[in-house]
Every structure is written in structure tokens, then in C-alpha cells.
Image (cartoon, rainbow, N blue to C red):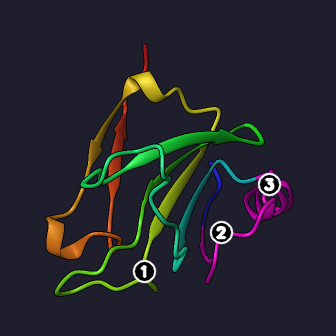
Amino acid sequence: MKIAAYNLQFANCIGRWTLILAQLAAIQIIGFSGTKQELPTHLRAGTTVFSEKIAGFRIYHWPCAETEFSNLSTGVSLAIKGANRYNVHVFSPPPSLQGRAGAIVEYTG
């Protein structure tokens, strides 16, 4: 299994996720920091994590937020090749650390 970490520095450009994931297609798990990923407008305020499927990866995003210990330069994401979003348990940090950390446990079967 190949695992990588990548400091994205900005993820909100159209097509940026697709381009980066295509370049890292041989890796199964990729942790991204510094995404500056914002909460999509169709999700309600207070949502701490959301996921989407791009280029064969399930990506879990913990978006940036203005809090005591976080700012709009934070945001982390975890991309898992071929992951099924229904077989995971998501862990989010306390609200004051929004966008600084996140974790999942993937179940098989």
C-alpha cells in the first residue's frame, strides 16, 4: 500500500483536485493539508466534514473555519482510492480545531 502526504496550499480552483489526483493515481491513501477548502454552500453551517468522489478517490474534507485555533488558511482532506463512504466512521476534531485534523476508520465487508 502506498501512502503520501501533500501540502496543497489551495484547493478551490476548478479542476485542481482532478489534476492532482491524476498525478498521484498510483497512491492509495493521500493526506492533504493547507487546502483552504471551504464548506460548499449547499451544506448547512456547522458541518464539520463532507465527502465527494473524484477521479476514483473518495475524498473526505474537513474545511477551514475561523476559530480560536484555526483560520481560513487551514483545511485538511484525506483521499482514499476506491473507498466506499458507507463503510467508514469519521472522526472530527473539536470545533475550535476545525480544519486542522480529521480521521476515518474504514470497515471492510
Mark 1 lies on residue:
74
Identity of the residue drawn at 52% across and 76% down: 36
Mark 2 lies on residue:
12
**Image: magenta residue range:** 5-26
Mark 3 lies on residue:
18
Identity of the residue drawn at 56% across and 33% down: 83
Q: Earlier in the sequence, mark 3 or mark 1?
A: 3
- Amino acid carrying label 3: it is Thr
The image shows residue 82 at horizontal and vertical percentages of 64, 32
* CA distance for labels 2 and 1: 13 Å
Q: Earlier in the sequence, mark 2 or mark 1?
A: 2
- Amino acid carrying label 2: it is Asn
Label 1 Cα crowd, 10 Å radius (few <14 / some 14-19 / many 20+): many
Label 3 Cα crowd, 10 Å radius (few <14 / some 14-19 / many 20+): some
Q: Are marks 2 and 1 in contact (CB under 8 Å)?
A: no
Instruction: Residue at the far top: name it.
Output: 109
Of tags 3 and 2, the one toward the viewer is 2
10 vs 95, left or right, is: right
- Amino acid carrying label 1: it is Thr
